[in-house]
Amino acid sequence: MGRLEYIGERDGWRCWLCDEPVDPTRSANDDRGPSVDSRLTKAKAKGTEQGAADRLAHRSCNTKKGAIAAVVPWPGHLFVVDPAPIITAVDRLQRKGGREVMARCPTHDDAQDAAAWLADRVSRLAPDMHATTGVERGGDQFLVILRT
């Protein structure tokens, strides 16, 4: 099994950036074709095992990201205020553990929806990180919490 196939199988043939399926039969020259991307910039990857930060991405997602740090966006259908950068928070929790406030929501239902989406997304973004999400009341708002 080649490197691309190994990473694709490990990542469930989903793009780590846009979280959409990647078709393994498409050409690597196709915009929606598979490619290998490093989750970390070269500066951040120093000291990590070679290939440990490699993830599956669509060629267009990988090209669009370039050599800058990636951003995993919060979806527009969620009602969140002041959403935290997901990759930064996940990296920090992987190093230090603990908890992070990821977003504020006006209603409990909005916070529950955001927490469920975040748990699902983080489970694919960092499958080895055993994280949980929760909702806490804070004043007249609800906080979406990510814990390790």
Image: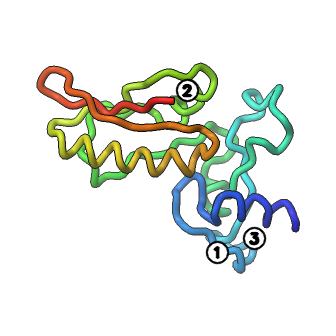
Circle 2 residue: 93
Write the residue at 81% across / 27% down. 46
Mark whose residue sits in front, 3 or 1:
1
Question: In this rendering, is residue 71 above or below 146?
Answer: below
Question: In this rendering, is residue 113 above or below 142?
Answer: below
Write the residue at 75% across / 58% down. 7
Circle 3 residue: 28
Residue 111: where, in percent of width, then height?
A: 25, 40
Question: Which secondary structure lies at badge 1?
Answer: loop
Residue 107: where, in percent of width, then height?
A: 15, 39
Write the residue at 62% across / 62% down. 60
Circle 1 residue: 23
Rendered image coloring scheme: rainbow
Question: In this rendering, is residue 73 above or below 89?
Answer: below
The Cα–Cα distance between marks 1 and 2, rounded to whole angstroms, is 31 Å
* Disc with the residue nearer the chain's start (3 vs 2): 3
* Disc with the residue nearer the chain's start (1 vs 2): 1
Mark whose residue sits in front, 1 or 2:
2
- Amino acid of disc 2: Leu
Displayed quadrant of residue 146: top left
Question: Which secondary structure lies at badge 3?
Answer: loop
Write the residue at 18% across / 39% down. 108
Q: How many marks?
A: 3
Mark 1 touches mark 2? (CB < 8 Å):
no
Mark 1 residue crowding within 10 angstroms, few (<14) / some (14–19) / many (20+): some
Observer-nearest of 87 and 63: 87
Mark 2 residue crowding within 10 angstroms, few (<14) / some (14–19) / many (20+): some
